[in-house]
Image: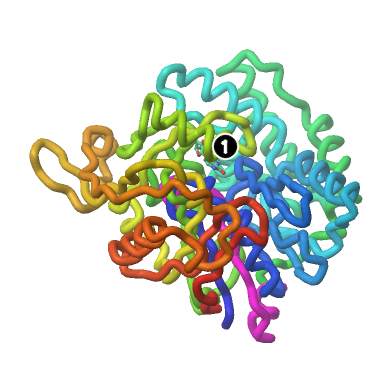
Amino acid sequence: MPGLAVVGAQWGDEGKGKIVDYLAAQADMVVRYAGGNNAGHTVVAGGRTVKLHLVPSGILYPGVTCVIGNGVVIDPEVLVEELDALEQQGMPAEKLRISNRAHLLMPYHRDLDRLEEEARGSRRLGTTGRGVGPAYVDKAAREGVRLADLADEAWLRERLAAVVPRKSELLRKMYGHPGYTVDEMFDYCLRFRSRLVPLLVDAGEVVGEALERGQRILFEGAQGTMLDLDHGTYPYVTSSTATAGGVLPGTGVGPGSVSNVLGVVKAYTTRVGMGPFPTELSGEQGEWLRQRGGEFGTTTGRPRRCGWLDLVQLRYAVRINGIRQLALTKLDVLSGLERVRMAVAYEIGGRRLDRMPASLSELAQVQPVYEELPGWSEPLASARALSELPEAARRFIGRLEELLGIPVVYVSVGPGREQTIAVDGIAW
Ligand code: IMP
């Protein structure tokens, strides 16, 4: 069954949106399986820039069916805004399908995200403040409202009566927020009914049947491996499964549905929010990368923390996700550096460490052991083949492949679709 999962191999913002958009040309269906509008994809195609938070990147191809799986939490305001914006740009999302089992992100989730972060003070996590964490908390606590509930007024009211008074009490007692009435939330939900209910499907069935027909399915990951709830740098993570394993519970398909995993790796590392980051460059070099790479969040506009590539972290990501091929992005950003570095190991208390420690206090103390490679001065933006890259850039790619033991099949040298070097094809 030709199911390709595309995942972020670092802390998110690796450029998955561009790679998914590029590969969607070969796909029949693109499926989002995790996260919410904490994610942000910028896709540049035909001179147009489209920012997407919930709608899968494949939406730009009229022939591709896009599915938002049950693993995604959906802020209906954001989704409807995104659909309106796409329509205004002449790209109606006719081929969008939404899982009826996906959970709604409610206004009180947004309030709680903000108020909880404020209450954490200096121990804040640095969330995107979109309510995503609290929405997943409610899902696990069995206090969520699902999209299917929108279709049945009596049941919707019943669900809201079960959860809204308790949420409001929490907001009032803990944070002095006035909270919401059941009626308010009922009217709120109904606002989206006519727009969203026609798009609802049993997504597991839709995707499963497409796989059985031999269609090519692209599972689009959100965030990155190190933000995964289980395998990331907990607690500085998001509240969903950002790794390839999330495809199954987040879509409703079986383990045989993922035939290949493509890891997207940026030529350097970035992260937003708090938490340890061993190869972080503070000061001038970090600022240089931030400016050169335009490293400001798509969702929040926050400056991203920047640093060198980290092979300890990437080896971990390759294993956790079962990554078999790589897409290397933003290689063009490194042009102009005399020397480039990649961390090949960590050191802590005079001891060498080749693995990602689970302990965050340990991760905060490790010192990267760097390998230095010659840099290159030539701009790469117009390169369309590996042979058009300077020798030093090719060496950088070769070393990455050697250290990870898997091939780089795409190299991205700019935001445009055409700025993608296909070194090899993707194995679906
Ligand atoms: P939340 O997902 O808003 O709860 O934020 C939790 C952590 O994940 C914070 O460090 C965020 O900055 C980070 N995060 C969430 N979504 C993204 C993303 O799409 N790119 C990068 N970081 C993200």
The amino acid type found where label 1 is placed reads Gly
Q: Is residue 205 visible?
A: no
Residue 104 on image: x %, y %: 70, 45
In the image, residue 147 sits, relative to residue 307, either above or below, namely below
Q: Give the camera-side residue of 289 and 257.
A: 289
From the viewer's perspective, tell me whether residue 75 is left or right of residue 218.
Answer: right
Residue 61 on image: x %, y %: 78, 65
* Residue sitting at x 31%, y 46%: 341
Q: Give the camera-side residue of 296 and 73.
A: 296
The quadrant of the image that shows the C terminus is bottom right
Within the magenta stretch, is there residue 23?
no
Q: Is residue 74 visible?
A: yes
Q: How many marks?
A: 1
| Element carrying mark 1 | loop
Mark 1 is surrounded, within 10 Å at the Cα level, by few (under 14), some (14 to 19) or many (20 or more) other residues, namely few
In the rendered image, which quarter is residue 198 located in? bottom right
* Residue sitting at x 50%, y 79%: 256
* Residue sitting at x 37%, y 56%: 392
Residue found farthest to the bottom: 213
Q: Give the camera-side residue of 200 and 28.
A: 28
Q: Which residues are magenta?
A: 205-228
In the rendered image, which quarter is residue 368 located in? top left
* Residue underneath mark 1: 294
Residue 80 on image: x %, y %: 82, 45
The quadrant of the image that shows the N terminus is bottom right
Within the magenta stretch, is there residue 206?
yes
